[in-house]
Each structure stands twice: as C-alpha cells, then as structure tokens.
Image (spheres, rainbow, N blue to C red):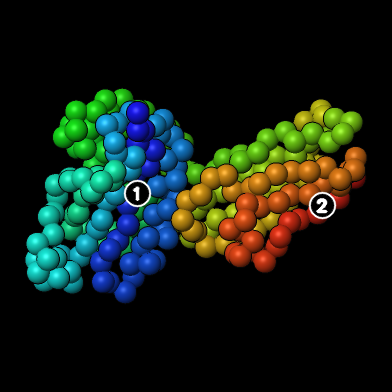
Amino acid sequence: MTKLRDVSLFSFSERPDSQKFNRGTLCVQDLYYRNLTPIKTNKIHKISIHLYDSDIDVERLNEFNVRMNKSFSLIDIIKINHYFDFDQYFNQPIEIQKRIILDLLYEDSINVCEAENWDSTNFKLAYEACLEQDLKNAFYDKEKAWNRNRSMYVNLKVIFETDILRGIVEVYRKDGSLVLEKELFAVEPMQIQHPFFAKVKWLSRNKFRVAPISFFNQLTDDEFWDIEVEE
C-alpha cells in the first residue's frame, strides 16, 4: 500500500522573486512534513502545490490550458495550481507569511482528502502541531550520543528559519550540565532532506567527530567537524 509522505508548495511563476519565495517557505513545509504521519493512499505519495501570479503568468497558463484550483493526478503525484498574491504576501511580517503558507498547505491537503476520500485526521493533527509549536522549526536530529565512559553526550540540533538553516552541536555532562554549544553551519534554506547529520563518533573520552550527510559537504565545505571538550 502506497503512503503519502509529502506535501510541497512552490512558486512556478516567472516573477523574478520566485526563488526568494521558494527558499522562504521551506521551513514551514519542513515543519508540516515532520508533524505529518504518512497516510495510506491508492498510489499517491505526494501532493504538489504550484503557485502563479495572475498578472504575470496568466497568458502562458491559458495558452497551455493549465487547470487552476482543482486537484488532478499525474501518475503518483496529485497536483494543484493556484493564483497567488505574491505582493501582498511579501508585504506581511515573517510570522504572518509563515501562517499563510501553513494554511495553504493544510487547506489543499483537506481538499485533496475530500476529493480522494482519504482520512484527513493526520493532516489536522499536523496542522495543530505546527500551531502549537508557534511555527518554529527547531528540532534535534540526533540525541544523546554518549562517549565511551558515558560521562558526556552530544545532541545535534537543527534550526530551520525562513532565511537561514543552522546546525548546532550541544555537549552535556552526565548530570545534564552544558559543556559546549557551538554552531557548525549556517546556510541558505535548501530542499528538505532528513536526516541532516550522518553520525556522531567519539574518538576519545573528550573528542568526537560530527559528519553531515553527503549533500551538506557541498554547502559547508566541511567533510566533517572534529571537536574536543573538557570534561
């Protein structure tokens, strides 16, 4: 049985700021994705929402008879096209922008559920969880990687914002006291891919290595980070 695991939203407009818009929405898409428990579908694994500008793109869309505001399937993806007021969106504060994106992700999810006769419970739970988290996307990618004598452990934290993606390493003693908090990388938001870190390997009692997954190497210029701390 196929499971739907992803709901994405991107501008396919010819506006010059489409790339800026797409980068800025990734943190909310990722938050919704992480809170969404996959649901069983007949063959669909993704909902893809495409946004266009009614002034800039309408002639091109009409020429190709692009269907708007109605979901339709393409093999194993359900696609929805909308006109979107980008100017109004960019004039809003960041928190309002994030809420606009979340609401659109959720509303289209529910509309697809109704059209496809799917259970919408998991989408509602994901939406509520995002609101409970105040649309803040910060999470631990790996937790409690203990050293050899279990006197210290490492947490790897990811903070996903609209304009930056940051990776943080935290080191704690056994009693829970903080030894070190350090930023490993800060890059522009990118296409969602979990996990962000590959592994933590302790090299000795007080030295460890953090390795990102392979695609991060191209973004950070770091193949791995070796970190030494005092016990």
- Label 2 element class: strand
- The circle drawn on residue 227 is 2
Residue at 62% across, 56% down: 214
Report the amino acid beneath label 1. Answer: Ser
Dot 2 or dot 1: first in sequence order is 1
- Gap in Å between the C-alphas at discs 2 and 1? 36 Å
- Label 1 element class: strand
Quadrant of the image containing the C terminus: top right
Residue at 35% across, 33% down: 2
Does residue 137 appear to the left or right of 88 in the view shown? right
Q: Position of residue 44 (x, y in %)?
A: 29, 39
Q: Is residue 214 above or below residue 150?
A: below
In this figure, which residue is indicated by the disc labeled 1?
8
Residue furthest to the bottom: 16
- The circle drawn on residue 97 is none
**Residue 107, visible in the rendered structure:** no
**Depth check, front residue: 138 or 191:** 191
Q: Nearer the viewer, mark 2 or mark 1?
A: 1
Report the amino acid beneath label 2. Answer: Ile
Residue at 39% across, 54% down: 25
Residue at 28% across, 63% down: 12
Label 1 crowding class (10 Å Cα cut-off): few <14, some 14-19, many 20+?
Answer: some
Q: Position of residue 93 (x, y in %)?
A: 37, 56
Does residue 185 appear to the left or right of 119 in the view shown? right
Q: Position of residue 182 (x, y in %)?
A: 73, 52
Image marks 2 and 1: residues in contact by CB distance under 8 Å: no
Quadrant of the image containing the N terminus: top left
Does residue 215 appear to the left or right of 114 in the view shown? right
**Residue 142, visible in the rendered structure:** yes
